[in-house]
Image (cartoon, coloured by chain):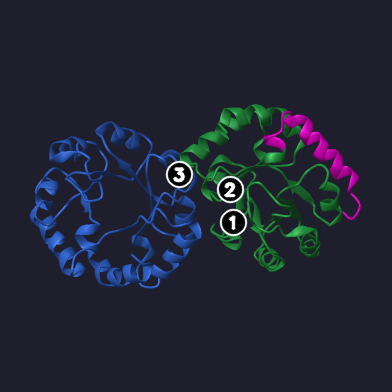
Chain colours: A green, B blue
Amino acid sequence: MPIEQLQEILIDIHPYVTSIHLREKQKTARELFQAVELLSKNIPLSKLIINDRVDVAFTTRAAGVQLAFHSLGPMIVKKAFPQLKVGCSIHSKSDGEKALRDGADYVLFGHVFPSQSKPGKTPKGIKELSRVTLLDIPVIAIGGITPENTKQVSQAGASGIAVMSGILDSRDPLLAVKAYRNALKDGDGKK
Amino acid sequence: MPIEQLQEILIDIHPYVTSIHLREKQKTARELFQAVELLSKNIPLSKLIINDRVDVAFTTRAAGVQLAFHSLGPMIVKKAFPQLKVGCSIHSKSDGEKALRDGADYVLFGHVFPSQSKPGKTPKGIKELSRVTLLDIPVIAIGGITPENTKQVSQAGASGIAVMSGILDSRDPLLAVKAYRNALKDGDGKK
């Protein structure tokens, strides 16, 4: 999706989301920097989380960085850039334990349900999510989350949800975001 | 080349070179970080320059970062990380003027001669190098440089040379480095 198109959608929806995670794995540092500069005209930097590129997150003054296994380690990043919020993408409870020990601020766990972006891969499921949320760190659930299954996710102890296609591929992204928000409120049992 | 093999070569040659530029464009941030950690057991960090990844350069305490067109801009990097030496890869005098204005510490200009790593691309040539070295910034020449043509490069005003295959593909990298050094001394006319 061209960044200008993403911007149009984000202008509408950003008041209803906590964070915006810019994945954009194919973009160069220069392109990512320019994308953040553009988005920050309309969206608070305090909501922007950059994928992998700690240098881009730091120099753009984005809120934080989302680290994958192939990224710099969270302990190294936290030590060098204490002002950045650091999230770790995890796939198991033991990944989560490591992220917690290493000082991550939150973890992104998934994919919880079958997901278009992970074709053929077995989802982790709600039961595994419930095990991960026992850890003393906020867990954001990702993967195949719909307004219909959000309540389950929330009741499994997730502190939040991360949604891409469920919003960006929707005919009305703002309506979709609101549906997710309502579902989150409904499921606000365990947390 | 596996990093362990590179390390073996660098252990021999590092006393004879000013800087070691880790290109490794395919490596992830995690892999690059680990490579620098490994290399730094035998090679002073003050000689290591990391390609593109400012975050890796900063967190490993490498000497600096080599920025391409697709990287973060030198002005942004210098401002956020004043302790890093910043080099810019350039292909023209006007690129060099921009790098100078943006506070780069040096430029890497090339490719000067036909190079295996740039097949089919017209080299910039010695004449263009001579124009670039008129700028008030150190110019490191790159591309197809051999001990035989080093004197020309030096006399065209280059402050140094950057060599990859001429050393790493050589049967005796240490001997190759020494041949380049001798050629540099010979050509020490203009600078």
User: Can see residue B188?
Assistant: no
A113 sits left or right of B146 in the view: right
Mark-to-mark CA distance, 2 and 1? 8 Å
B155 sits left or right of B19 in the view: left
Q: Position of residue B165 (x, y in %)?
A: 23, 58
The chain identifier of the residue carrying mark 2 reads A
| Residue A68, numbered label | 1
Relative to B156, is B5 above or below?
Answer: below
* Three-letter code, disc 3: Val
List the residue tagged with mark 2: A51
Residues drawn in magenta: A167-191
Q: Nearer the viewer, residue A95 or A58?
A: A95
* Residue A24 forms part of the magenta stretch: no
* Three-letter code, disc 1: Ala
List the residue tagged with mark 3: B77
The crowding category of the residue bearing disc 1, from other C-alpha atoms within 10 Å (few below 14, some 14 to 19, many at least 20), is: some
Dot placed on the residue nearer the N-terminal end, 2 or 1: 2
* Three-letter code, disc 2: Asn
B15 sits left or right of B50 in the view: left
Indicate the quadrant where residue A22 lies: top right
The chain identifier of the residue carrying mark 1 reads A
Indicate the quadrant where residue B104 lies: top left
